[in-house]
Image: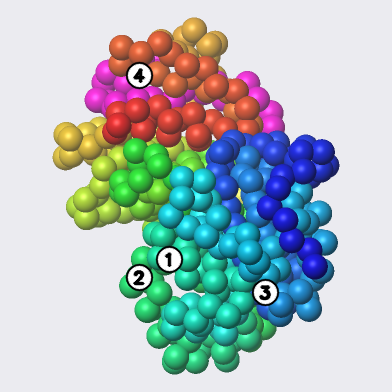
């Protein structure tokens, strides 16, 4: 029988700790695995949690052990797996009302059978016993269902999920593919773990983000646009969600993460209308990360002939940022400034734009200074605070920006 809770500090898995980020540094997570074929994904899941700094202790039901061997999760976590409750009262030791208790019980994957048992207070497997104890101790529980689609659609299964949600238990719902309610990708599971465990001042704040380029139609085929990839806006949305905010993104794409709301806008006019319409609903923070078009054109009704020369008259578009500040004087605003000038002039121009726009914070970057679209080099400029320079992946920069924002909400 495989069972132990002591950490083997020599286990090679521990070399991965914090290699991606420190978003889960110091967090202790019980990863409870039930008898779904999706259990095969938990080896990678455990490692992704560890790569972000977490300590992970696996617990398996007997049914889960028919899918993968406990040694697989011992390999993945660096800890021997709990497969039964013994005289060590493992469920109380890790999920009881103790100062040494773990921070989260993550049940992934979770079968319909296990959901029903937890909803009924039945604890006849190590996983359900851990669940009963965690719920009684008010330790956060995140459940990730995985089962055949017809089981997920069963009225009682849905009622059991709602019952547990009413008790404060969080669910990350499955994705429907091939008539199966499949476990979400590990990246989405990790993101939701980070969100559940976040203690950021941004938790519960409503954040509106504009992202990506605009497309101003010249004719039905051609458009006027910019080189913006929209990656910075996506990373800001993910980071805000990770920190517990309620996030809406106005752009022409879809982030595709349940819980992050997408609002479609293609042109600068579309974006102006969408932003003003959203802000009427009440937001705490507006992040203007989009490369909003400075110019538009009068669209030709048909395709313009390619024969001969062509003159296009550019018309300036209204500044969304100025309108937002005028209409919502108490809103916290993050502005962006991209330019091609040298660094000193870039910062100087950004400081002037900060004053003119009435934004609370502005992020400036020199366009063309970094060729890799996944990274950037920016200056974060605030009032009465030294300018901070941040270089690296856009996910890291998003973290630095929102860290600066969160300091205003402490």
Q: Are marks 2 and 3 in contact (CB under 8 Å)?
A: no
Circle nearer the viewer, 4 or 1: 1
Q: Where in the figure is residue 172, as x and y percent of width and height?
A: 51, 66
Q: Which mark is residue 135?
A: 1
Residue 298 counted in the magenta span: no
Numbered tag placed on residue 61 in the rendering: 3
In the rendered image, the vertical position of residue 34 relative to residue 258, given as above or below: below
- Between disc 4 and disc 2, the foreground one is 2
Secondary structure under badge 2? loop
The quarter holding residue 340 reads top right
Q: Which residues are magenta?
A: 349-373
In primary-sequence order, the first of circles 4 and 1 is 1
| Residue drawn where x is 35% and y is 46% of the image | 203
* Sequence-wise first label, 2 or 3: 3
Q: Relative to residue 4, is residue 291 drawn left or right?
A: left
> Label 4 vs label 3: CA separation?
52 Å
Q: Is residue 322 above or below residue 4?
A: above
The residues bearing labels 2 and 1 have C-alpha atoms spaced at a distance of 9 Å
Label 1 residue SS: helix
User: Going 48% across and 58% down the picture, which residue do you hit?
Assistant: 96
Instruction: Give me the residue at 40% from left, 49% from top.
Output: 244
User: Label 1: how many residues lie within 10 Å, few (<14), some (14-19) or many (20+)?
Assistant: many
Count of numbered circles on the image: 4
Looking at the picture, how far across and down is residue 361, in whole percent? 35, 25
C-alpha distance separating marks 4 and 2 = 42 Å
Residue denoted by label 4 = 382
């Amino acid at each position: 029988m495989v069972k132990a809770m002591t950490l083997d500090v020599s286990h090679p898995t521990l070399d991965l700790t914090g290699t991606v980020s420190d978003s889960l540094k110091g967090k202790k997570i019980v990863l409870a695995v039930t008898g779904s074929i999706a259990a095969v994904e938990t080896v990678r899941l455990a490692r992704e949690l560890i790569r972000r700094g977490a300590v992970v202790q696996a617990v398996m039901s007997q049914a889960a052990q028919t899918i993968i061997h406990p040694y697989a999760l011992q390999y993945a976590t660096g800890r021997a797996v709990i497969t039964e409750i013994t005289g060590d009262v493992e469920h109380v030791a890790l999920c009881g009302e103790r100062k040494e208790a773990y921070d989260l019980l993550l049940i992934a994957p979770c079968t319909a059978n296990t959901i029903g048992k937890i909803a009924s207070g039945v604890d006849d497997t190590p996983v359900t016993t851990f669940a009963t104890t965690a719920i009684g101790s008010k330790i956060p529980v995140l459940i990730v269902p995985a089962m055949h689609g017809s089981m997920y659609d069963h009225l009682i299964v849905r009622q059991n999920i709602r019952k547990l949600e009413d008790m404060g238990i969080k669910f990350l719902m499955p994705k429907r593919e091939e008539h199966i309610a499949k476990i979400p990708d590990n990246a989405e599971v990790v993101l939701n773990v980070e969100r559940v465990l976040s203690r950021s001042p941004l938790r519960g704040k409503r954040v509106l983000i504009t992202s990506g380029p605009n497309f101003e139609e010249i004719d039905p085929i051609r458009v006027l646009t910019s080189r913006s990839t929209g990656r910075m806006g996506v990373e800001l949305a993910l980071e805000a969600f990770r920190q517990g905010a309620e996030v809406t993104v106005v752009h022409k794409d879809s982030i595709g993460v349940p819980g992050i709301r997408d609002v479609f806008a293609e042109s600068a006019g579309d974006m102006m209308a969408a932003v003003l319409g959203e802000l009427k609903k009440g937001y705490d923070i507006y992040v203007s990360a989009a490369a909003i078009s400075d110019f538009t054109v009068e669209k030709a009704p048909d395709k313009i002939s390619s024969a001969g020369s062509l003159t296009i008259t550019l018309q300036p578009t209204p500044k969304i940022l100025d309108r937002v500040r005028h209409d919502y004087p108490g809103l916290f605003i993050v502005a962006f400034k991209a330019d091609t000038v040298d660094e000193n002039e870039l910062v100087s121009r950004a400081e002037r734009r900060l004053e003119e726009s009435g934004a609370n914070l502005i992020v400036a970057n020199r366009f063309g200074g970094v060729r890799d679209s996944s990274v950037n080099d920016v200056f974060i400029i605030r009032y009465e605070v030294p300018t901070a320079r941040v270089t690296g992946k856009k996910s890291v920069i998003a973290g630095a920006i929102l860290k600066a924002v969160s300091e205003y909400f402490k």
